[in-house]
Amino acid sequence: MKTSVCIIGGGPSGLMLSQLLHLKGIDTVVLERQSREYVLRRIRAGVLEHGFAALMREAQCGERMDREGEIHDGFIIAHNGKQRRVDLHKYSHGSSVVVYGQTELTRDLYEARDRMNGIIIHNVEDVQLHDLLSANPHVTYRTGDEVARIDCDYIIGADGFHGVSRKSIPKTVLKEYEKVYPFGWLGVLSRTRPVSPELVYARHDRGFALCSLRSQVLSRYYIQVPLTDNIEDWPDDKFWDELKRRLPEEIAARLVTGPSIEKSIAPLRSYVAEPMRYGSLFLAGDAAHIVPPTGARGLNSAASDIYYLYHALLAHYQNNDNTGLDTYSEKALARVWKAQRFSWWMTTMLHTFPESNFYDQKLQQTDLEYLFSSEMAQGALAENYVGLPF
Ligand code: APR
Ligand code: PHB
């Protein structure tokens, strides 16, 4: 098979790029290791920067997001029993975020690909990338006993952190940066009315907590837990009790509890791989960078990669202009590192670090007090949260 752009990975990054390019007459093939049902079973975050929401509309799959997603103009930070609101609208010149689950967003992208008869091959195994330093790379993969080959101009590695693409870049070329946090997030999804119309990020001596939502009848809650904890250690009742203890009394009193329909523990890590290009291979999303979820930047960082790649490939195919491709890695990384910094800062300000000494704790407290005593500081938080310009 021959195509222009072969995309490894059928997650939000790969699907979004495939859809945007198809709308401009550039053909793609998406190879996905799992089934569609498996990909759509993943529960992930759901706060979209305004730039990402605009990209969904440009990709002609923003209709359900605009109908069912919620526009949020602010969120709450709670600490030491106090609640303070971050007014995103006021401090980002009228901007906001869209709260809309990544699972729903990925479903919309798949349906948009179906409407355009996009080529997505699921359940592929043993994907291998070849001749990356040539102008005619190709990809091989297996479905059952059959080995297939795709010839293309470019390969996009949108196959997440555990994918094959990044591993295809020689260790002598790839530079990796990593920070692992000494705790994880225990997340619960429940068919209950959200405790707050806006997200609540809570700093507490017992650990961080987050109250989020998917809709007015579907809530998502997280608490910080030691990395050694397992799901079995956290029956629903214990989870709800601990969550209440970490929230201001007034919020805890309003909390509607119920059976968890999904419960999982995710470790917190910051990771960046450089460069994000190796010959005809371009990395995007989790394949190149991971952030702790505290700043809700994971999906949004992936979207900015896709924004730069989309415009770079468009310039190549429409005007034979390779400037965008040649500057992709540098441009994408510049914005990725800002999302890394913001996610690290939010994580450091709002979590309880087992090894922290009194000096660290005083600094953390001062960081929060400075935040709420300075309009400039709230402005910096707001502009990062709604999304820095592409
Ligand atoms: N061959 C084909 N597909 C693969 C391979 C492979 N060797 N390895 C992984 N994949 C698929 C995975 O099954 C997954 O569906 O690539 C896809 C990568 O999707 P994501 O991990 O969702 O990554 P991305 O599309 O970049 O989305 C980033 O996901 O994890 C969240 O916080 C993150 O929100 C961010 C978003
Ligand atoms: C979520 O809704 O899952 C969510 C929201 C905000 C975050 C992280 C996760 O910062």
Image: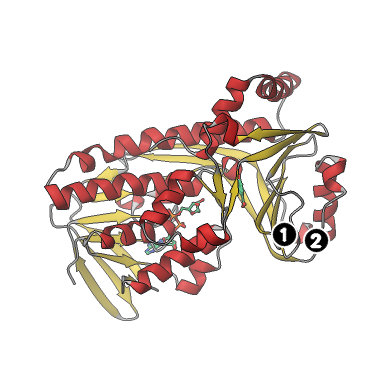
Residue 386 percent location from the top left of the image: 52, 39
- Dot 1 amino acid type: Ile
Q: Are marks 1 and 2 in contact (CB under 8 Å)?
A: no
- Which image quarter holds the N terminus? bottom left
Residue in view at x 33 percent, y 40 percent: 174
- Which image quarter holds the C terminus? top left
Residue 201 percent location from the top left of the image: 70, 40
Residue in view at x 72 percent, y 34 percent: 352
Give the colour scheme of this rendering: secondary structure
Label 2: few (<14), some (14–19) or many (≥20) C-alpha neighbours in 10 Å? some
Residue in view at x 39 percent, y 51 percent: 55
- Dot 2 amino acid type: Asp
Residue 348 position by quadrant: top right
| Residue 254 in view | yes
Mark 2 sits near ligand 2, with its Cβ under 8 Å away: no
**In screen coordinates, is 270 left or right of 307?**
right
Tell me the distance, in whole angstroms, between the alpha carbons under discs 1 and 2.
10 Å
Find residue 236 and name its label.
2
| Residue 169 in view | no
**In screen coordinates, is 82 left or right of 99?**
right
Instruction: Between label 1 and label 2, give the one nearer the viewer.
Output: 2
Residue 115 percent location from the top left of the image: 36, 73
Mark 1 sits near ligand 2, with its Cβ under 8 Å away: no
Question: Toward the viewer: 314 or 205?
Answer: 314
Question: Toward the viewer: 283 or 177?
Answer: 283
Residue 202 position by quadrant: top right
Badge 1 marks a residue whose secondary structure is helix
Badge 2 marks a residue whose secondary structure is helix
Find residue 231 and name its label.
1
